[in-house]
Amino acid sequence: MIYNKKLIELRENSNLKQYEIANILNIYKGLYNQYETEYEIIPIKHLNTLCNYFNVSFDYIFGFTNKKNYKNSIDEIDKTKSGNRIKEFRKENKITQEKLANELNMARSALANYERGRNVIATPFLYSISSIYLISADYLLGKIDEKINLN
């Protein structure tokens, strides 16, 4: 993934230090540093907080678009709506859970839990689905209602 460049750019353009972003996320500065270096993968909940703070989309942070944000984007992620969208996307493309799980190198049961709305999709899987199938991460998370293709 390449979200770290955008995180650094947004932080520096706002004249913020890593410890200030860590305070926003209510985490230690060292952990935030690991997110910026991609030593640790930033969880969706923290990425969502930063997207909301900087008023940018997941698609922008992931480098899928130069457009910083979408109209009518909501702040919260709805696990149920996100799960339904992942399932809908999979069925529209005639992809079985098994096939998609294999493509994403994850357990089918984990994918099933995302689709059932039990868990919010993990950052690397959201990034992979969006980049492989060119579908908006913001749409899949339920932050926007317009189905955007990332061509």
Image (spheres, helix red, strand yellow):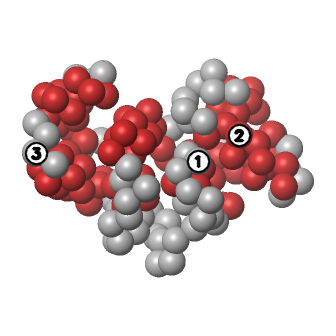
Q: Is residue 80 visible?
A: no
Along the viewing direction, whichever of 85 and 81 lies nearer the viewer: 85
Crowd class of label 1 (few under 14; some 14 to 19; many from 20; radius 10 Å): some
Q: State the image coordinates of residue 129 (x, y, percent, origin top left).
A: 34, 41
Crowd class of label 3 (few under 14; some 14 to 19; many from 20; radius 10 Å): few
Q: Are marks 2 and 1 in contact (CB under 8 Å)?
A: yes
Task: Please give the count of numbered marks on the rendered protein.
Answer: 3
Which marked residue is nearer to the observer: mark 2 or mark 3?
Answer: 3
- Residue matched to label 2: 5
Circle nearer the N terminus (2, 1)? 2
- Residue matched to label 1: 63
Circle nearer the N terminus (2, 3)? 2
Q: Distance from label 1 to label 3 (Cα)? A: 27 Å
- Residue type for callout 1: Gly
Q: Secondary structure at mark 2?
A: helix
Q: Secondary structure at mark 3?
A: loop
Q: State the image coordinates of residue 31 (x, y, percent, origin top left).
A: 68, 28
In the image, residue 37 sits, relative to residue 60, either above or below, namely above
Crowd class of label 2 (few under 14; some 14 to 19; many from 20; radius 10 Å): some
Q: 21 left or right of 73?
A: right
Q: Is residue 140 visible?
A: yes
Along the viewing direction, whichever of 64 and 7 lies nearer the viewer: 64
Circle nearer the N terminus (1, 3)? 1
- Residue matched to label 3: 94
Q: Residue at x 16, y 29 (%)?
A: 99
Q: State the image coordinates of residue 82 (x, y, percent, origin top left).
A: 29, 55
